Image (cartoon, rainbow, N blue to C red):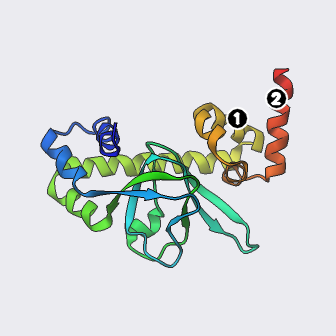
Amino acid sequence: MDAFDKLKTHLLLRVPLTDTEVAVVLDRFKEKKVRRKQYIIQPEFVARTRNYVVDGLLRAFVIDNQGADQTIQVAGPDWWISDYGSYVNQTPATMFVEALTNGTVLQIEYEDEKWLKAANHKFETLFRIMAERSASYQQRRVISSLTQTAEERYNDFVARYPTLAEELPQYVLASFLGMTTGFLSKIRNKKVKKLH
């Protein structure tokens, strides 16, 4: 299955589109190969694209006042990633979006997405569904960071996204879950000991 077939499957699971409508949407996307450690969005530059991950791993992160990076979002295959504040408002980005591995993304530019939304209510519905899912995910993440222990956050993440939990570098997963790599190691070692 090629990159565009994967995106087509993804879109059709969300909105019933005709073959012609699918072709119109896919025509607005461009395929981009990314290399490990490559930035596709950087602070102070406007995020021009919304990115669908075909394969590989990416993350969005900020640098705090102490110079440490804080992972805000992670994305594996069949996920979307961008600096959404920058993309939606077309203002300078505040986050880096970095490839953690070599991979492929399909990118749509802001103006193309805007054109699609105006052209067909089904396309507008598609992007609204994506926005609602993203908002719901971010809300769940904020609530878990305020109400769960670090261990509970880790267990919840592993239960929901076992493949991603295995594949993400430990420092990224720890940062995403709001803990140090040392603390994440302790949690993982504790789980391993329970299994034996």
Q: Judge whether 28 appears above or below 193 on screen.
A: below
Residue for badge 1: 155
| Mark 1 burial class by Cα count in 10 Å: few <14, some 14-19, many 20+ | some
Q: What's the residue at 32%, 50% (across, down)?
A: 128
Kind of residue at badge 1: Asn
> Does the residue at mark 2 contact the one at mark 1 (Cβ under 8 Å)?
no
Q: Residue furthest bottom?
A: 44
Residue 156, position in %: x, y?
A: 65, 35
Kind of residue at badge 2: Val
Residue 48, position in %: x, y?
A: 38, 69
Q: Quadrant of the N terminus?
A: top left
Looking at this view, is 165 or 85 the one in front? 165
User: What element does badge 1 sit on?
Assistant: helix
Q: Residue furthest left?
A: 20
Q: What's the residue at 20%, 44% (across, down)?
A: 22
Q: Is residue 94 left or right of residue 116?
A: right
